[in-house]
Image (spheres, helix red, strand yellow):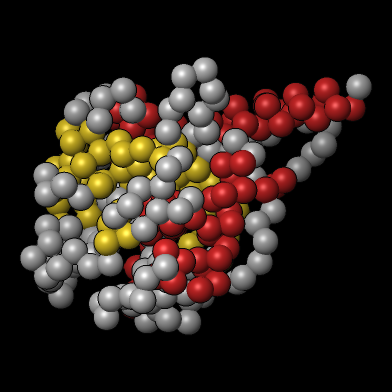
């Protein structure tokens, strides 16, 4: 990056995190996760961002100085020990390194007012990172995951809460989504609020709690997969475009802060 360029000439940098090398993932599952991550990457690039692909399985400390925005992708189940549970037998594909990295990444992003988008597991990590817990198995009859050998994705409607960040983006009270999850938010973290529900009462989206007179971090988690190829056109573009715009604002904010500190 050329240090002589002005902030408006430099693309915002978004870190896209997923457990690419998780030892608990099968080759087939890893391939699916990579495909979904690369689809999000392509939309972020098309929206004008530079993207750093972060392998959450390589345990380390997130470098927030490099990032103007963050996306945490789907993947295996969150370690139940993180929300003080012994764990359901259905829990699988746990990667403790990814849990540590992404929990830290999300917390550091929120603390620095760096915008965060969580998708599926990313939303669940978001909730757990701030003290929430998860329903460990929605059961075999759940409407949120297919039992088909061809695809685990299912389509269903979600109701969006008015006066929410998600509603301001989608501009409609109901959308059709593509889901594939057997877990869900149980106890919501104190700093988060629900912004969408499924018809069976399962939480489908969360965001930072809005407090009058207080700057609210741009934090949004969706339980579904807007990056799935079968999703209604426009959903992924809407979410990634909004994130890129917030990342641009964050980039300018950091630039202004550095300029003020240098004078």
How many numbered marks, from 0 up? 0
Between 2 and 205, the one lying in front of the other is: 205
x and y percentages locating residue 86 in the rendered image:
36, 76
In this view of the protein, which residue sits in the foreground, 158 or 244?
158
Find residue 14 and report its horizontal and vertical position in percent: 57, 45
Residue that extends furthest to the top in the rendered view of this protein: 213
Seen in the image, is 261 located left or right of residue 9? right
* 62, above or below 257, in the image: below
Residue 156 is left or right of residue 108, and the answer is: left
Q: Residue at x 76, y 27 (%)?
A: 257
> Looking at the rendering, in which quadrant would you find the N terminus?
top right
State whether residue 91 appears in this view. Answer: yes
- Tell me if residue 166 comes above or below residue 71 in the rendering: above
User: Residue 136, relative to residue 240: is it above or below?
Assistant: below
Image quadrant in which you'd find residue 55 = bottom right
Task: Answer whether residue 43 is visible to the viewer in this image.
Answer: no
Quarter of the image containing the C terminus?
top right
Q: Residue at x 53, y 58 (%)?
A: 103
Q: Quadrant of residue 255?
A: top right
Residue pictured at 48% horizontal, 82% vertical: 23
Instruction: Give the camera-side residue of 110 and 145.
Output: 110
- Residue at the right extreme, as displayed: 263
Where is residue 183? Give x, y as percent.
Answer: 27, 62
Q: What residue is at 23 percent from the left and 33 percent from the top? A: 160
Q: Position of residue 248 (x, y in %)?
A: 59, 30
Q: Toward which corner of the image does residue 121 lie, by quadrant?
A: bottom left
């Amino acid at each position: 990056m050329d240090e002589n360029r002005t902030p408006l000439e430099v693309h915002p940098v978004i870190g896209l995190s997923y457990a690419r090398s998780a030892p608990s993932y099968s080759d087939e599952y890893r391939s699916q996760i990579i495909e979904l991550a690369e689809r999000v990457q392509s939309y972020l690039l098309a929206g004008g961002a530079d993207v750093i692909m972060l392998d959450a399985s390589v345990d380390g400390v997130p470098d927030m100085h490099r990032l103007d925005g963050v996306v945490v992708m789907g993947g295996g189940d969150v370690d139940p020990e993180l929300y003080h549970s012994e764990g359901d037998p259905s829990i699988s594909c746990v990667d403790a390194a990814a849990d540590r990295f992404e929990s830290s990444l999300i917390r550091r992003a929120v603390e620095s007012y760096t915008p965060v988008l969580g998708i599926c597991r990313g939303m669940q990590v978001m909730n757990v990172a701030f003290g929430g817990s998860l329903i460990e198995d929605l059961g075999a009859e759940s409407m949120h995951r297919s039992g088909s050998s061809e695809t685990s994705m299912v389509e269903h409607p979600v109701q969006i809460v008015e006066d929410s960040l998600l509603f301001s983006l989608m501009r409609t009270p109901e959308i059709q989504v593509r889901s594939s999850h057997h877990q869900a938010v149980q106890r919501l973290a104190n700093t988060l609020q629900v912004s969408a529900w499924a018809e069976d009462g399962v939480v489908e989206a969360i965001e930072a709690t809005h407090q009058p007179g207080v700057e609210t971090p741009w934090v949004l988690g969706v339980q579904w997969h807007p990056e799935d190829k079968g999703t209604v056109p426009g959903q992924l573009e809407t979410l990634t475009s909004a994130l890129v715009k917030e990342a641009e604002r964050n980039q300018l904010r950091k630039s202004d802060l550095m300029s003020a500190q240098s004078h």
